[in-house]
Image (spheres, rainbow, N blue to C red):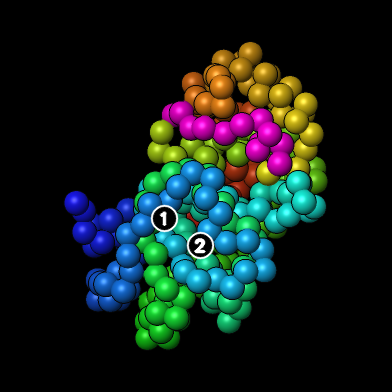
Amino acid sequence: MLTNQAVSSANCLLRSLPQLDRDRLVARSESVELIFAEVLYRTGDAIPHVYFPTGGFISLVTPVSADTGVEVGLIGSEGVLGITLMLGIEIAPFQARVQGAGTALRINTALFLRELQQSLALQQILKRYLYVSMRQLAQTVACNRYHLVEARLARWLLMTHDRAEADTFHVTHVFLAYILGVRRVGITKAAHSLQQQKLISYRRGDITILDRIGLEAVACVCYQIDKETYRSTLA
C-alpha cells in the first residue's frame, strides 16, 4: 500500500510545497477513496474536511432549483477542495460531488487551519490557487452566457479528460444537461455532432475520447484560457 507521502506527490499543489511543510501537512492527513456520485458537502454546509485529490476529481455545482444546477468548477489533482477556508469562511459555497472515482488526501478543517497558520509557503500557494479559481469561475460564467452548447460540451470533456487520466469515463446525458445548465435535448444533439465528427464515442453513459486534438479545435477558447491561467500562476 502506498504511504501518504507517496500519494501526496500526485497532487500538484502538495508537490510544490517545501519538503518540511508538505511532510507536516501530509502527516495530519489521511488517504481516502472518492466514490463516484458521492456528495462531499452541499451548499451551505459547514466544511468538515479539505481534500487534495490525487486520483479522482470533484464537480462543484451551484444549485438553481431542486432539480437544476450549473457546474462552476472541476477539481482534480491540480487543486484542492475547501479553498474558501482561505477567506475565513467555513461554509461551503457550492455542492461538491465526486465525478471521477479515485483517491484524495483529506485533512480535518481545524488541523488544516492550524497548518495554514504555521506555513507561509502553504498560504502563498493556496492564495495563488484561489486567484486561479476566481478567474476560472468568471470564465465559466462568460462561457455559459455566450458559447454554444457543442463548444461548451467539448470544453467540459477536455477538462474531464485532463483529470480522469483515462480516455473513457462515465457520465450521463442527464447529468451533463444538469451541470451545463441546458435541456437534455441540447446535450443529445451536441454529443451526436461530436460523435459524427469521430471526436468521441458514447455508449450507455460511457464517453471515450477518440480525437483529442480535434476536440480541442471544437472547444471554445475558454479551455485554453483556463489552462494558461493555471500555468502562468502556479506552474
Q: Position of residue 89 (x, y in %)?
A: 61, 78
Quadrant of res 122: bottom left
Q: Is residue 218 above or below residue 119?
A: above
Image position of 38 with respect to 147: above or below: below
Q: Hey, what amino acid is under mark 2?
A: Leu
- Asked if residue 22 shows in the view, the reply is no
What residue is disc 2 on? 81
Element carrying mark 1:
strand
User: Which numbered marker is on residue 122?
Assistant: none
**Disc 2 to disc 1: CB gap under 8 Å:** yes
Q: Residue at x 21, y 59 (%)?
A: 3
Q: Earlier in the sequence, mark 2 or mark 1?
A: 1
Q: Position of residue 33 (x, y in %)?
A: 38, 52
Q: Quadrant of residue 121?
A: bottom left
Q: CA distance from mark 2 to mark 1?
A: 8 Å
The magenta stretch is 167-178
Residue at disc 2, secondary structure? loop
Q: Nearer the viewer, residue 195 or 184?
A: 184
Give the image location of residue 87, x and y in percent: 59, 78
Of 75 and 132, the residue lying toward us = 75
Which part of the image, by quadrant, shows the C terminus? Answer: bottom left
Checking the image for residue 53, the label placed there is 1
